[in-house]
Image (tube, rainbow, N blue to C red):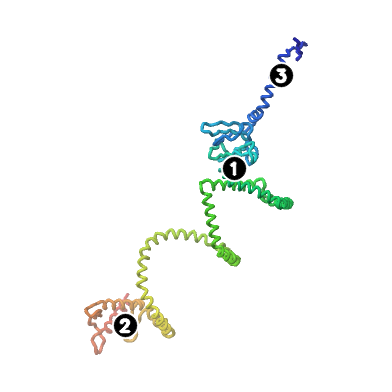
């Protein structure tokens, strides 16, 4: 058999390999290359970095491992790595997604099997982020998954009348396009480019001042709001029903609403004037607040001390209501009396008040010194005290009561001055004698 020289050796000799061995090696390499080509997707998916997510579908709907794509918002983010049939007919699907995608799915994502075209064909898994922000890990349950509905299945559920109506609708659409509808569509397409510029400006404005974050934040906020609305079953339906009732009420009272809207400019003008005046008042209040703040602090302490006083005063205030009710007739009677008192006070002006402020006031505030027949009677105390004592004594002697009422008690007494028509007043003589003795004692000292 012929030998083939293949490799050289260090000693100058060449090793030889038979044609059979060489053919075997080539065949094995070809088989390995073919197997690698046939399993290219599996090898690439295995070697590619990423995270594996489990999805539990109600049934396996034409998903092919290492071929069916995984997308988010129709953007490829991974591939199906395994499909395992379950005893109950469901399917546990493993998908391998690119690094970082699990953070974008949030904490409660959902999955839907969708066709690439309207008529079917290849299918892919559409991952929909959902729930509060967070990194997803684990398995998407069957409750958050869905499978597509084929067009032929929809047509099977339609009744013959519905199919006839659909057939007529297609025929009418064709007739509409023939009778000028196509021209209208052409004009729309001609006019559409003119609207693309303003539409571009609107879309550019929708991106916000920070295009990298504003629109994303808006979408995330809307998504969070939608997730919050869907958290409780029937909550969104209740909100829609409430909005419907509100719209109905507004429709029933459209005239009243129109009247209110018509008067709104005048109301806003009045409110604007009021707010301007209020702004001035608030400015003054702001200037006063700095001064009043310490007073308010002290007032707080005073109010705390006042609380127990108010609690104790509550019974008194409650009883005072009855007193005020009983005093109402007296107060009403004071009204005519006050009118007469006004006239009386007017009469007191002039000589009467001058006399009271003059000699009467001087007499009551000074000591008493007797004159003429009363020269020997005097006192060291002000006269108003003597008058008060006299009134007190008179009150005492008038405190006696008998069957006829109050009486004045008079006690008869005899003194040195009671002897009448005597040539010498014995009481005056004794007073003079006592004064002489007093002067003699003072002179002897």
Q: Is 397 positioned to the left or the right of 196 in the image? A: left
Foreground label between 3 and 1: 1
Residue 355 falls in which quadrant of the image?
Answer: bottom left
Front residue of this view, candidates 202 and 369: 202
Residue 129 spot, x, y in % from top left:
59, 41
Residue at the extreme right: 12
Pointer 2 residue: 376
Gap between marks 3 and 1, in whole Å? Answer: 55 Å
Residue at the farthest left position = 403
Q: In which quarter of the image is residue 374?
A: bottom left
Distance of label 3 from label 2 (alpha carbons):
166 Å
Q: Residue placed at 66% from the left, 28% from the top?
A: 40
Could you tell whether 377 is left or right of 339 in the image?
A: left
Mark 3 vs mark 2: which is more N-terminal?
Answer: 3
Q: Disc 1 marks which residue?
A: 155
| Nearer to me, 10 or 188 | 188
Quadrant of the rendering where the C terminus is positioned: bottom left
Marks 1 and 2: CB-CB under 8 Å? no
**Disc 3 target residue:** 26
Q: What element carries label 1?
A: helix
In the picture shown, does residue 10 fall above or below 419? above
**Residue 250 on image: x %, y %:** 55, 60
């Amino acid at each position: 058999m012929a030998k083939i020289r293949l490799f050289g050796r260090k000693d100058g000799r060449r090793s030889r390999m038979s044609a059979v061995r060489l053919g075997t090696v080539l065949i094995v390499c070809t088989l390995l290359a073919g197997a690698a080509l046939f399993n290219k997707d599996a090898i690439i998916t295995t070697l590619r970095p990423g995270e594996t997510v489990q999805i539990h579908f109600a049934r396996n709907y034409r998903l092919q491992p290492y071929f069916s794509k995984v997308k988010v918002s129709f953007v490829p983010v991974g591939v199906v790595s395994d499909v395992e049939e379950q005893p109950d007919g469901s399917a546990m699907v493993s998908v391998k997604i690119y690094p970082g995608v699990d953070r974008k799915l949030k904490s409660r994502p959902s999955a839907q099997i969708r066709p690439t075209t309207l008529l079917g064909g290849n299918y892919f898994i559409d991952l929909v982020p959902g729930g509060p922000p967070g990194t997803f890990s684990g398995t998407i349950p069957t409750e958050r998954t869905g499978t597509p509905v084929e067009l032929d299945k929809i047509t099977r559920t339609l009744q013959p009348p519905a199919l006839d109506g659909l057939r007529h609708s297609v025929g009418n659409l064709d007739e509409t396009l023939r009778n000028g509808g196509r021209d209208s569509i052409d004009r729309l397409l001609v006019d559409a480019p003119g609207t693309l510029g303003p539409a571009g400006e609107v879309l550019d404005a929708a991106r916000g001042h920070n295009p990298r974050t504003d629109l994303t934040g808006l979408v995330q906020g809307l998504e969070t709001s939608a997730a919050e609305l869907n958290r409780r079953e029937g909550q969104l339906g209740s909100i829609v029903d409430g909005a419907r009732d509100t719209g109905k009420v507004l429709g029933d009272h459209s005239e009243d609403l129109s009247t209110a809207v018509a008067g709104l400019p005048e109301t806003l003008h009045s409110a604007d004037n009021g707010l301007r005046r209020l702004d001035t008042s608030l400015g003054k209040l702001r200037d006063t607040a700095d001064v009043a703040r310490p007073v308010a602090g002290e007032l707080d302490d005073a109010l705390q001390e006042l609380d127990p006083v108010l609690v104790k005063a509550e019974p008194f205030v409650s009883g005072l209501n009855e007193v005020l009710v009983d005093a109402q007739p007296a107060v009403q009677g004071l009204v005519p009396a006050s009118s007469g008192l006004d006239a009386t006070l007017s009469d007191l002006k002039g000589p009467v008040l001058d006399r009271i402020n003059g000699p009467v006031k001087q007499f009551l505030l000074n000591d008493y010194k007797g004159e003429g027949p009363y020269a020997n009677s005097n006192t060291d105390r002000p006269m108003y005290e003597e008058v008060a004592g006299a009134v007190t004594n008179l009150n005492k002697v008038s405190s006696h009561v008998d069957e006829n009422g109050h009486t004045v008690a008079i006690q008869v007494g005899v003194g040195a001055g009671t002897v009448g028509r005597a040539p010498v007043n014995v009481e005056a003589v004794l007073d003079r004698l006592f004064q002489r003795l007093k002067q003699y004692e003072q002179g002897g000292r």
